[in-house]
Image (cartoon, grey):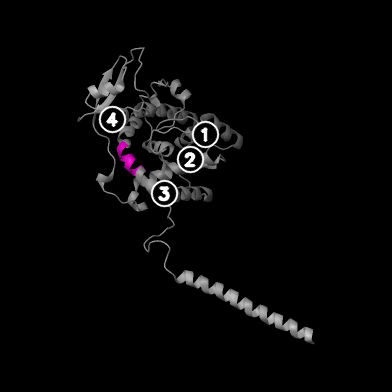
Amino acid sequence: MDKSIKILGLIAIISVSSMFIFGTKTDSIKNVLNSDKNTSETYQIKALKIPDYLEFAGEKVPLNKPDIYERIDKELLVNTYWQSNGLLLIKRANKYFPIIEPILKKNGIPDDFKYLAVIESGLQNITSPAGATGFWQIMSATAKENNLEVNANVDERYHIEKSTEVACDYLKKAKNRFGNWTLAAASYNAGMYGISKKLEEQLVDDYYDLLVSDETKRYVPRIVAVKEILSNPEKYGFIFDKEDLYTEPEVKIIKVDSAITNIARFSKDLGINYMVLKLHNPWLRENNLNNASKKLYEIKIPKDL
């Protein structure tokens, strides 16, 4: 009898304790829900509505396929809510697209490929861990195969006009090989051989039906998403004035067919400094231009000194 009473008492104590614990937990949840947000009252992270129709280089994106829809959604979210990077891309695009666009047009490459340069480099002269360099992330061997000069003294992968021409040559060859621009774009990431092999192995002929590496899987959706955002910035919350955008100053060309022993001194003689000359001519890699072959180089300097 005493034992039964003790057991009942223990059960009662446990029940009361449980009520206290779970009651406290419930109250805490209510307090969190009723408390002020831990961000600005106006700050919201909103799910994006995917446009009914998206295309790349005139080729429709099959948004009716759930996997493709999710891949596009991911890239739109990532590039919309990485706000600082998005705004920088918009600013740089205003500066560099006017240089890239006419070269693409001249070569018969769809205008949408300017967004490929955006996702490759962020429109910056960067170098990848693998050694790919410049706006179009060209490898040294590829550059040399396409008659770009690459050495310690001069690296024309940093020359925006010349590197864009090389990218155009590649994309034209890829289009001829694959028959459409979407696969040509994918091959810029995975290589023509890599894409051809995957297509053959998987018995398909469409990028959107192809199982590829995560990087290549994201590649075209990233281009499509960046195109959509940069084409409609206000729709995605990017607010700016025209004067906020970067611009390329007018330049004049100085032609040089001899060596320059000291580029800093050369710059001074032109009425500018070494930094300004290098900003306009990042392909000059050292403080001298050897030019033993007497090659004709075109050096940009600001028009208004």
> Callout 1: helix, strand or loop?
helix
Nearer-N-terminus badge (3/1): 3
Q: Position of residue 7 (x, y in %)?
A: 74, 81
**Residue farthest along the left direction in this orientation:** 304
First in sequence, mark 3 or 2: give its number: 3
Q: CA distance from mark 3 to mark 2?
A: 17 Å
What is the three-letter code of the residue carrying label 2? Tyr
Q: Is there a contact, CB below 8 Å, between mark 1 and mark 2?
A: yes
- Asked if labels 2 and 3 touch by Cβ distance under 8 angstroms, the answer is no
**Which one is closest to the eye, mark 3 or mark 4?**
4
Quadrant the C terminus occupies: top left
Q: Which residues are magenta?
A: 89-95
User: Depth-wise, is mark 1 or mark 4 nearer the camera?
Assistant: 4
**142 magenta-colored:** no
Q: Amino acid at mark 4?
A: Val
Q: Main secondary structure of the magenta part?
A: helix
Look at mark 1 in the image and give the residue it sits on.
190
State the residue position of label 4: 276
In front: label 3 or label 1? 3
What is the number of the mark on residue 219?
2
Secondary structure state at the residue bearing disc 3: loop
Quadrant in which residue 258 is drawn: top left
Q: Earlier in the sequence, mark 1 or mark 4?
A: 1
Using the image as rendered, state which of residue 237 and residue 82 is in the foreground. 82
- Give coordinates of residue 87: x percent, y percent: 35, 46
Residue 82 circle label:
3
Q: Give the Cα separation between the discs numbered 3 and 4.
A: 31 Å
Q: Secondary structure at mark 2?
A: helix
Instruction: Choose the circle earlier in sequence order: 3 or 4.
Output: 3
CA–CA distance between discs 1 and 2? 9 Å
CB within 8 Å, label 1 to label 4 = no
Q: CA distance from mark 1 to mark 4?
A: 36 Å
